């Protein structure tokens, strides 16, 4: 069986049919309409799609995917385009499906504690809707007021409070999806107890390679009764890292544990005037949350540990306003680094929590060796580092050197038994490290899955899986599936 | 963001424009606060999308004509600047871009005539008053007047209040605590002259002597924001000359004028007056900002307990970072209860000439704002910008909610004088 990837002829036929499906203002093909979609939260990558559709109904999405399949044109669906790994960068000359107008909360059942939403619903909108019933949707990526749940599902997004409550995949109960061939199927359901394998779990975090989510059933949690937010200042970054190890070892499970170093504190302070201590080398934010009695009982233990870790200044948020200020600063830190440097790469490596201090020392060493500034702001509680590697893209070779440094940090994470991504996904940016992260047979299994679901490699082609989606071919000759004619190289 | 903008070729604005583009990290934090993105949910109508479009044009990869429809749909509310963690100077980029684009625009004849009409009447109180009177006569013929000309007619009030000439000096009551100069505002003088009188009285009551330079011109904001850069520079130069140096501050009581005057250094970038403009800009303050700073020395009291909702004008809250000060002032008034309007950060759709240029969007935003105000139990709306006041008033009436819209200074003035809050003093 010989498959040819969609060419220009196919594209013109596709658009002819899309024109019948969409009014002109929802089928975008002019340069001024395409340019703003060329990149996402990682501007080092850019690609111009052949066109963009803005569906408003599930049926339009399904018809669009069917047409892409029919004409063999690759497509990528995206929400607000806030990916930090290039996961929502369009496919060059492919079709972009902008789901931003599919932003309805279809069902909200406070008694059952679930919400069924369309993929274009903003993360924070769910908690806003549920707030009167004292419920909320727990995963809280820093881009919560911006990012969409479709994207959260695709990238299994995390957030500061995922330490206690888990990532997106722990909060998605069911999905209605359109597969890359246009067929619609239901994965999971509306309760945690399910029959059969966890197909929802397979889809969540698949970075769009298995199709497009049409409906997402979310689990809602009761809002914590109280928060107790402590901000501890340290005279060294390593000490803050070691404090996390202490807290984790003690058995306490805070809602969130975050570290920001001096550079990121400066940036966040400039952005929102968070009022962080001006002489600290690092601060640790620890938030206890839950029922009042529980938090009350944990407080002294936490303070004891923080004191032991050598914090020189400990502040407790007096009210909601102060708590919000601390968090607004933390959550704006990535973008705020734009004040310090024209360009930067946000890394997302994970190390075992017992090796935080050691890892921070290593990052500092690498930063000196490369003579590149690195700001650190991260979800310390789960060992998820976010080094922000700053460079000036106008200097020749600067991006390459920054990427090289990023690579060394990722390899360090792998060496310590960690991972190349905690929550941002592989996207375009970390494909090159997949072979270092995974064994050959692990990857082969991923390819097999991908090809079983999407033999034409249409859905978000080029993301997550290493280049050309056929790494084994380059190292070992033809893949067994290729020999059987099931898959093909582009 | 990476760019290859030929900074030097563009001229004096090249640098600030390139800087804004460079600072943008495309994170998308501006999307949820952008009024037009909230309507269309497409990148071209978002701040970061417009930044990309302007960058593409400046880099020579896109024609002005292609990008302008989307750039023109921007209200210039700069809500995105408040939301932006990386500190992009979007407003400066937009003003500069509109100035640059003017030469490349292909405007229709009707468009050019309308624009000429707006730019030669609105900034001149005498001409505007005359125009408004003429327009009033034309109102019965509204059905025959098409498009934007019709929109302009809709915005005109049916009666114009009598406007007494403002005095050159309005002395402080009691010991003088400060001395300031006041920009009277063009449209404001015609549509609601009472705002300036209320401002004078309130300042006097608090020991502030006010000078009203009689030779002052329009602040130039309207011209600058519609791309008429040369006219804006003329106004700026004129005001730099006629406003005195020996005052504690130069006050504005219309948010749009205040933010416009804050841009004088940008408009005059690369001109001989740039340094003077920079010093001038440092002294420009909104009346609420200034008064909150020097402090209220006479406590005012309303006759009856009254709920007042604070409307945040974009050009106060986003362009000048003034949010708390008007609230602080109103909070000092006895018998006055402050009410918050939901989503008060979102533009009401007035935005200078936007309700003439993009009437549909302006109306949609105006309706939303009126509905948000209507959802509260407020009895009065306080605002700090004549444009917002006209827009909100229009849409509250459409909604059949007759809630008076007053300037913060008018409310303080009524409280000092012990007269009903919505009584206009002639």
Image (tube, helix red, strand yellow):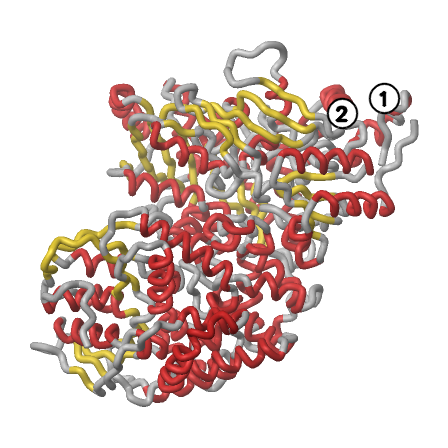
Which mark identifies residue A427?
Answer: none
Q: Residue furthest top?
A: A195
**Pointers 2 and 1 in contact (C-beta within 8 Å):** yes
Residue A315 falls left or right of residue B72 = left
When the figure is inspected, residue A383 is found, relative to residue A26, above or below; the finding is above
- Seen from the viewer's position, the closer of residues B38 and A449 is B38
Instruction: Identify the residue at image location x=58%, y=59%.
Output: B50
When the figure is inspected, residue B299 is found, relative to residue A23, above or below; the finding is below
Residue B282, image x and y in percent?
Answer: 34, 73
Residue A118, image x and y in percent?
Answer: 55, 33
C-alpha gap between disc 2 and disc 1: 10 Å
Q: Residue furthest left?
A: B174
Instruction: Identify the residue at image location x=42%, y=86%.
Output: B237
For the N terminus of chain A, the image quarter is: top right
- Seen from the viewer's position, the closer of residues B400 and A427 is B400
Residue B292 in view, yes or no: yes
When the figure is inspected, residue A136 is found, relative to residue B51, above or below; the finding is above
What residue sits right under mark 1 in the picture?
Answer: A481
Q: What secondary structure is found at the residue carrying circle 1?
A: helix
What residue sits right under mark 2 in the picture?
Answer: A447
Residue B275 in view, yes or no: no
Instruction: Identify the residue at image location x=43%, y=69%.
Output: B154
Instruction: Identify the residue at image location x=44%, y=29%.
Output: A137
Residue A167, image x and y in percent?
Answer: 51, 26
- Judging from the image, mark 1 belongs to the subunit labelled A
């Amino acid at each position: 069986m010989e498959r040819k990837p969609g060419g220009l002829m196919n594209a013109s036929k596709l658009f002819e049919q899309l024109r019948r499906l969409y009014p002109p203002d929802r089928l975008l093909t002019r340069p001024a309409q395409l340019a703003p979609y060329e990149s996402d939260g990682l501007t080092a990558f850019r690609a111009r799609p052949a066109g963009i559709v803005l569906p408003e109904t599930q049926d339009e999405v399904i018809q669009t995917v069917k047409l892409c399949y029919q004409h063999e044109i690759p497509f990528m669906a995206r929400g607000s385009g806030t990916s930090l790994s290039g996961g929502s960068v369009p496919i060059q000359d492919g079709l972009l499906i902008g789901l931003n107008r599919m932003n309805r909360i279809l069902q909200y059942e406070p008694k059952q504690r679930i919400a069924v939403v369309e993929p274009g619903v903003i993360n924070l909108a769910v908690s806003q809707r549920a707030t009167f019933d004292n419920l909320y949707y727990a995963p809280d990526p820093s881009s919560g007021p911006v990012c969409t749940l479709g994207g959260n599902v695709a990238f299994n997004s995390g957030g500061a409070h995922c330490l206690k409550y888990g990532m997106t995949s722990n909060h998605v109960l069911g999905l209605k999806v359109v597969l890359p061939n246009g067929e619609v199927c239901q994965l999971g359901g509306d309760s945690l107890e399910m029959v059969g394998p966890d197909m929802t779990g397979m889809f969540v975090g698949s970075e769009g390679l298995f199709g497009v989510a049409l409906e997402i059933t979310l689990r809602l949690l009761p809002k914590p009764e109280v928060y107790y937010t402590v901000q501890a200042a340290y005279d060294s970054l390593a000490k803050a890292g070691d404090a996390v190890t202490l807290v984790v070892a003690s058995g306490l499970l805070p809602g969130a544990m975050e570290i920001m170093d001096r550079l990121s504190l400066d940036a966040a302070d400039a952005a929102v005037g968070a009022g962080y201590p001006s002489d600290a080398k690092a601060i640790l934010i620890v938030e206890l949350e839950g029922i009042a009695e529980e938090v009350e009982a944990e407080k002294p233990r936490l303070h004891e540990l923080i004191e032991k870790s050598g914090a020189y200044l400990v502040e407790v948020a007096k009210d909601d306003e102060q708590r919000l200020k601390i968090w607004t600063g933390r959550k704006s830190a990535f973008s705020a680094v734009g004040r310090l440097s024209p360009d930067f790469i946000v890394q997302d490596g994970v190390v075992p929590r017992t090796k935080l201090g050691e890892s921070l020392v290593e990052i500092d060493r690498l930063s000196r060796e490369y003579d590149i500034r690195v700001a650190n702001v991260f979800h310390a509680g789960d060992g998820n580092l976010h080094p922000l590697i700053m460079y000036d893209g106008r200097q020749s070779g600067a991006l390459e050197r920054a990427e090289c440094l990023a690579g060394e940090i990722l390899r360090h994470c792998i060496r310590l038994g960690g991972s190349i991504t905690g929550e941002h996904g592989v996207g375009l940016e970390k494909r090159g490290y997949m072979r270092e992260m995974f064994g050959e047979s692990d990857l082969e299994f991923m390819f097999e899955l991908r090809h079983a679901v999407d033999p034409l490699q249409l859905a978000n082609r080029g993301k997550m899986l290493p280049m050309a989606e056929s790494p084994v071919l380059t190292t070992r000759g033809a893949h067994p599936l290729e020999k059987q004619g099931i898959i093909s190289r582009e | 963001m990476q760019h290859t903008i030929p900074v030097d070729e563009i001229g004096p604005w090249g640098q600030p424009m390139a800087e804004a583009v460079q600072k943008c990290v495309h994170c998308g934090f501006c999307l949820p606060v952008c009024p037009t993105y909230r309507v269309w949910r497409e990148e071209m109508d978002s701040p970061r999308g417009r930044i990309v479009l302007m960058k593409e044009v400046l880099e020579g990869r896109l024609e002005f004509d292609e990008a302008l429809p989307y750039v023109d749909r921007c209200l210039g509310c700069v809500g995105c600047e408040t939301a932006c963690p990386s500190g992009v100077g979007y407003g400066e980029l937009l003003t500069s871009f509109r100035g640059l684009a003017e030469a490349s625009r292909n405007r229709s004849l009707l468009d050019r005539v309308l624009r000429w009409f707006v730019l030669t009447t609105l900034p001149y109180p005498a001409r505007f008053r005359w125009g408004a009177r003429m327009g009033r006569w034309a109102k019965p013929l509204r059905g025959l007047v098409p498009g934007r000309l019709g929109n302009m007619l809709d915005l005109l009030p049916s009666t114009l209040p009598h406007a007494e000439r403002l005095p050159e000096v309005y002395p402080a009551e009691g010991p003088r605590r400060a001395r300031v100069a006041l920009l009277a505002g063009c449209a404001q003088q015609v549509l609601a002259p009472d705002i300036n009188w209320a401002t004078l009285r309130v300042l006097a009551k608090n020991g502030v002597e006010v000078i009203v330079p009689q030779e002052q011109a329009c602040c130039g904001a309207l011209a600058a924001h519609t791309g008429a850069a040369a006219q804006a520079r003329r106004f700026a130069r004129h005001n730099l000359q006629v406003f005195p140096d020996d005052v504690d501050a130069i006050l504005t009581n219309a948010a749009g004028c205040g933010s416009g005057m804050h841009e004088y250094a940008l408009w005059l970038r690369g001109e001989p007056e740039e340094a003077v403009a920079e010093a001038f800009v440092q002294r420009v303050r909104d009346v609420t900002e200034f008064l909150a700073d020097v402090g209220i020395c006479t406590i005012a009291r309303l006759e009856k307990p009254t709920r007042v909702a604070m409307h945040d004008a974009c050009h106060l809250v986003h362009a000048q970072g003034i949010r708390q000060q008007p609230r602080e002032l109103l909070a000092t008034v006895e018998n006055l209860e402050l009410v918050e309007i939901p989503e008060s950060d979102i533009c009401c759709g007035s935005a200078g000439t936007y309700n003439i240029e993009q009437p549909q969007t302006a109306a949609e935003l105006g309706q939303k704002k009126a509905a948000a105000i209507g959802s509260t139990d407020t009895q009065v709306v306080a605002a700090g910008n004549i444009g917002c006041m006209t827009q909100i008033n229009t849409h509250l009436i459409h909604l059949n909610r007759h809630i008076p819209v007053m300037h913060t200074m008018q409310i303080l003035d009524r409280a000092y004088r012990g007269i009903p809050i919505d009584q206009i003093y002639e």
